Amino acid sequence: ETGVTQSPTHLIKTRGQQVTLRCSSQSGHNTVSWYQQALGQGPQFIFQYYREEENGRGNFPPRFSGLQFPNYSSELNVNALELDDSALYLCASSLQGTYGYTFGSGTRLTVV
Amino acid sequence: DAKTTQPPSMDCAEGRAANLPCNHSTISGNEYVYWYRQIHSQGPQYIIHGLKNNETNEMASLIITEDRKSSTLILPHATLRDTAVYYCIALPIQGGSEKLVFGKGTKLTVNP
């Protein structure tokens, strides 16, 4: 079975720009969650998608948005980038109703 | 906020057992104790989980105190590849779509 794949692995953006991060979920999983991990901190929950709808959201502003596609892959979009958005963005897939989360290796976003 | 507390760092000699403690004195009877670890530049990886009884799998053992206020993750023969940040997380039994609430975890360094 394939694991979770995230792209790109690294990205540099300018403050005020918009960014889209992508995630392919593990085979057999139907739920995708996104986490933000600042340097030296644990991952922080952004939101989760199930059946192509947002199914829970953490304490993040609306400029953080997402999509889930029929094949269960997902995108994370961040508008009006701020310097503090610089972080590792992690995607995790799972089967709804279970805690078997599989994480990708993340996308390292740097905002300058 | 995380319901668990862990020491910020620990050291262990290669080949020896690594015992990582976690305090979860406010955990409810309906919450599992889950352990994840994050090796540098990778996403978190599931290790083991338990409710009341001690658990063992190919990666580790989990010892939960009878009052469930604390637990210990045991890596029986630590290797250099076990150097990582280890997270202890409480998750409700009924659910499966819950977000993972990561604290800062314990940075385990396995020394040669």
Image (cartoon, coloured by chain):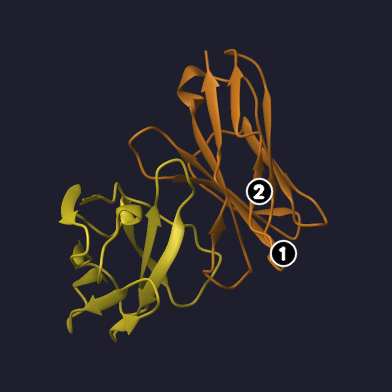
Chain colours: A orange, B yellow
Q: Between marks 1 and 2, how big is the CA–CA gap? A: 11 Å
Tell me which corner region of the image, top left, top right, bottom left or bottom right, holds residue A9: top right
Q: In this rendering, is residue B1 above or below B64?
A: above
Q: Are marks 1 and 2 in contact (CB under 8 Å)?
A: no
Q: Which residue is mark 2?
A: A5
Q: Is residue B7 visible?
A: no
- The percent position of residue A70, horizontal first and vertical second, equals 83, 56
Q: Of all residues shown, which one is farthest toward the right?
A: A70
- The percent position of residue A68, horizontal first and vertical second, equals 74, 50
Q: In this rendering, is residue B9 above or below B60?
A: above
> Mark 2 falls on what kind of element?
strand
Q: Quadrant of the N terminus of chain A?
A: bottom right
Q: Is residue B30 left or right of residue A62?
A: left
Q: Camera-side residue: A25 or B69?
A: A25
Which comes before the other along the chain, label 1 or label 2?
2
- The percent position of residue B31, horizontal first and vertical second, equals 36, 74
The amino acid at mark 1 is: Ser
Tell me which corner region of the image, top left, top right, bottom left or bottom right, holds residue B88: bottom left
Q: Tell me, for residue A27, which label it has, or none.
A: 1
Q: In this rendering, is residue B73 above or below A107?
A: below
Tell me which corner region of the image, top left, top right, bottom left or bottom right, holds residue A93: bottom right
> Mark 1 falls on what kind of element?
loop
- The percent position of residue A82, horizontal first and vertical second, equals 52, 19
Q: Is residue A6 left or right of residue A43?
A: right
Look at 18% across and 79% down and name the residue there.
Answer: B65
Mark 1 belongs to chain = A
Q: Is residue B35 visible?
A: yes
Q: In this rendering, is residue B37 above or below A1?
A: above
Mark 2: few, some, or many residues within 10 Å (few <14, many ≥20)? many
Number of dots carrying numbers: 2
Q: Are marks 1 and 2 on the same chain?
A: yes
